[in-house]
Amino acid sequence: MPILETRALNKRFGGLHVTNNVDLALEAGEVHCLIGPNGAGKSTLFRLILGEHAPSSGSILFAGEDITAFKPFQRIRRGMSVKFQVPGIFKALSVRQNLEIAMQHHYEPAGLAAEIGRLLDFLNLAPEAGRLAGNLSHGQKQWLEIGMAISLKPRLLLLDEPTAGMSPEETHATGEMVKRLNAEGMTVLAVEHDMAFVRQVAHKVTVLHLGQVFAQGSIDAIVADERVADIYLGKAPDHAKPEGAHA
Amino acid sequence: MNALLRFFRRLEGPQTLGRGPGFWIGFLVVLAGACAYPVFSDGYTVGNTVYFFTWIFMALGLSLIWGYGGALSFGQTAFFGIAGYSYGILTINFGAAYGFTLVAVVLAMAVAALFAVLLGYFLYFGRISGVFLGIVTLSVTLVLERFMAQTAGPEWKIGAARLNGFNGMSNMPPLTVPWPGGDIVLFPDVQLYYVVLGLLVVVYLGLRILVNSPFGNVLVAIRENPERAEMLGYDIRKYQLGAFVIGAALAGLSGVLYTSWGQYITPSSMGMTAAALPIVWVAVGGRSDLTTTLVGTVVVLSVFQALTIHGSQYALVVMGVLLVLTVLIAPNGLAFAAAGLIARLFRGRRAASPAGDA
């Protein structure tokens, strides 16, 4: 049974058909990357999965349960967790408090401080524990949010461009972390532009184009697919070229 | 035992200024001063001081809703009025015997809280936020004022209690404590002062524990980034509603104390001016902390009172100017602005001194 499944998922904004009959299935234990040119509908699909948008039609199943009508927080409690593209952290609060807010209902009060300490070490943020999260560097903010997301011990981790704004070294380190989390049993769905990162982590890649699933397969198969190269270069057979499509 | 220790440890925490022995010694000194104050004063003045104290509960409630929860509500005076009128209606009908006034306090606060549940449900579960929350709460408050102002006719009565329109309701009994050998009637005097002071200490410390609890953590998380808070699995509407209702109940406590203190309540207690003043008290001191809110409220109220007494007709104008200046110069409140300034001075001196040596 797939851990996440979308069935004939559609989303229209007025006349704009942003998500077009998307069937997507994520097997438990895989790292699945979602790629596609700008405007392909990746973010909308993400928001549909999280419940921030309601689909126009179709359904979403999580571990076999229909969650289409669930609110975002209910989906999180079922075992999803998300890291946003723009670091979604509590800027005016300390790093430690950011993690405490994420973790306070998942651990016994007596063991909470120790668990926070462990996670701070894991994220290389221990020296910054007392600083305000808003004063961290961009990369550190990304890491802090990843830490908050994984502290929920989700079954499915959703990453929206987790390496945006990171240096190649930080990107690689993030990839290694994703692989380590995956080895511990976490399923991961990531929207990502950085092909080196995709190559590093992905078991399976789905290419979205004009709101539809355009191609699916291993990273090697996708890279070898000429049609995929064409849509990134704006030479897709479709007449309606998505706005802003570029390599 | 451990749980109890953890509970009291929350008197200090990331959401409250002031920690360590220094702060608590200062707290005890101030409290001792407040306890000794009636000895050096006369009953009449002490009774007037109680009047100041009655407002602080409402201000602390607003600090919780706005300063901690990030939702600017103009509704505090609505709950103030509802509780005040409820106390009047209950005690005029059932009297003060057998300690009923104390029951009435609880019931009146419950009525205000219930109304807050109803209003807050539509606000938060309808996802009304930001400036719209302010507009809706202000509208509700003003509608209540208008409604109560037109209840002058004899048909507007509940049991024996006439609502009395714009003139308001009066002659309800003051708080009365049943006591062997004769009830203690709490007129605005030294006894009422100690009761209200005691309530103030309990509420202040209770709120400190609340805001440093997991509930308070989530509340400030919602203020900082509601989407992230929800995406950590929190039903943020329930937390916001919780803060709104607790804040409303505290406004209700203010309303009851005010009503029993002066034995009257009028619709203008819910008017435009009344609705705006708590915003000034809370904003000037520093809304995002209980202590700065408390101190700020006392100071602003004292200044306002002094201006009114000394014949200045511009007391309200001064309040308005104070609010505008605060928003422009120190949007987080004067206490935080002053702390920031001092920190910058020290840092500046430290940064400057090596350069000076060179």
Image: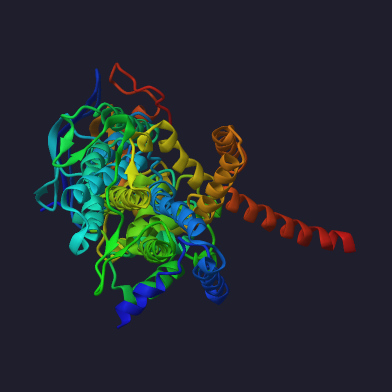
Q: Quick one: quadrant of the C terminus of chain B?
A: bottom right
The answer to which of A58 and A173 lies nearer the viewer is A58
Residue A16 vs residue B15: left or right?
left
- Establish if A25 lies above or below B313: below
Q: Quick one: quadrant of the N terminus of chain B?
A: bottom left
The answer to which of B106 and A24 lies nearer the viewer is B106
| Residue B42 screen position, x and y as percent | 52, 62
Q: Can residue A82 be seen in this view?
A: no
Residue B55 vs residue A80: left or right?
right
Q: Quadrant of residue A25?
A: top left
The answer to which of B116 and A156 lies nearer the viewer is B116
**Colour scheme shown:** rainbow
- Establish if B320 lies above or below B333: above
| Residue B230 screen position, x and y as percent | 30, 49
The answer to which of A39 and B46 lies nearer the viewer is B46
Q: Residue furthest front?
A: B181
| Residue A37 screen position, x and y as percent | 37, 32
Count of numbered badges drawn on the protein:
0
Residue A219 vs residue B37: left or right?
left
Q: Which residue lies furthest to the right in this view?
A: B358
| Residue A64 screen position, x and y as percent | 9, 51
Q: Is residue B48 visible?
A: yes
Q: Quadrant of residue B13?
A: bottom left
Residue A233 vs residue B309: left or right?
left
Q: Residue furthest bottom?
A: B1
